[in-house]
Image (spheres, rainbow, N blue to C red):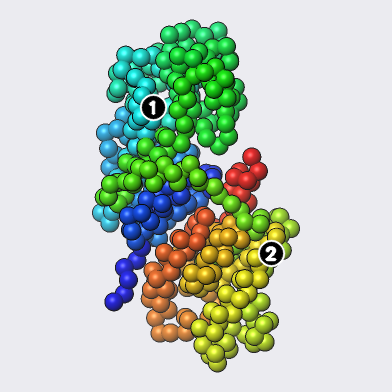
Amino acid sequence: MTEEPAELFAVIGKPVLHSKSPQMHNAAIKELGLHAHYIRLAADSPKEALETARLAGITGMSITAPFKNIIGYVDEVDPIAEKIKAVNTVVITPEKTIGYNTDAHGVAHSIIAKGVEIKGKKVVVLGAGGASKAAIVAMIEHGAKVTVANRTVEKAKELAQEFGISYSSLDPEELKKALEKCSIIIGCLSTGERVVPKDLLKPEMAIFDAYYSVESYLVKDGKEAGCKMIDAGDWLVYQGLVAFELFTGKKAPEKTMRDAVNSAQLSQGQRNISLVGFMGSGKDTIAKEISGKTEQVIFDIDREIENIAGKPIKEIFETDGEEEFRILESRVLSDIKNQKNIIVNCGGGVIMRKKNRKLLKENSLVVWLWASPKTILERVPKDGSRPLLEVENPIRIIEKLLGTRKCQYAEVSDMMINTDGKSPKEISERIIYEINKTFKN
């Protein structure tokens, strides 16, 4: 009996490599024994992300900045997302796409879980973006008196008019007035810089800053002032619980997801990059592009196998069989364990062995280069060098193999990129951008 293909879920954003959502969701998937994987998808627009999802069989997506305007691309929107005018979760069915916003639930339940009263309390929300709108709606729904404060005061004024709340600039004197008798400050600014003067923070305040890339001054100063601190990771967890249930129809295991967020750490191995993907996905050309921009040396697994065997890959398949080829593949992959600063150009089937997937994850940042079956067939040379496609109906073989390998690519990869319609230069620049944003902050 053929195993059913794994369900795929993804988080999209720009950047996206820093996201802890895969660790959180995959921990829950593992605990519940589901045949599914949650990945990071590096897209350049909401439209591209939805198109890729349809083609790759992704049935649920989490949306991070700057793509919450995906609301304009989905077929239906739930009432909370309609109020916030932003979508952070999309469920994709064969018939339609449905947009939700689970951020409002995330912010409210993070505060409630810490025993902080919301009803009747004064809340100041810093920022005027999508996360701010979610915080404002959540606080209004729970009976708070809300003020929004933003550097560009016109944006704060617009939100105030939209939701019937007060507004302020971030000017220290105006902010001082806004923070009088304030019980809760919710930070929704994508910066760790100091925006609230230290002397305005009081022990009776609760501080909840959504910015978790680094510890912000709002968090540092809040701790020093003796404020009640609410962890940014709680927002991720509580919104994620709802998203997980929308994706899977199963009750989310809260403790498992929380523990995963708290321990989440993305390691770039030894500063190596491994490119995986089906034949024709662009690994050769993209490896060369990255190498040219970073001066990293390319380690081509197929070429190394040919050197060891003393014959081309086609001949290895014909005379020794695929199993012997896979054994050589594992042997070569083991040799990269102690190498640094290399680009590992992997064969299309390298991910089929569990041992190989483990070695790749341990020793490198793994990027899954995805291409549609149609694109793959167009790119693969018809010179007899690809024995797997020397058949009557090659596109059917591609579809079958992609379906079989999909869960293995998803399991091993740190990030997926759709290479359809993009140049190697564009793709390599996106990979380098993601790495720089994640590891060089």
Circle 1 crowding by C-alpha within 10 Å: few under 14, some 14–19, many from 20:
some
Q: Residue at x 47, y 11 (%)?
A: 179
Image height of 287 relative to 396, above or below: above
Which residue type does callout 2 highlight? Asn
What distance separates the C-alpha of mark 1 from that of mark 2?
46 Å
Q: Position of residue 195 (x, y in %)?
A: 57, 20
Q: Which residue is mark 1?
A: 114
Task: Tell whether 338 sits left or right of 355.
Answer: right
Q: Residue at x 49, y 19 (%)?
A: 227
Residue 96 is at least partly visible in this image: no
Q: Which mark is residue 143?
A: none
Q: Position of residue 339 (x, y in %)?
A: 70, 64
Q: Which residue is mark 2?
A: 338
Q: Residue at x 45, y 14 (%)?
A: 204
Image height of 379 relative to 165, above or below: below
Numbered disc 2: secondary structure: loop
Which residue type does callout 1 highlight? Lys
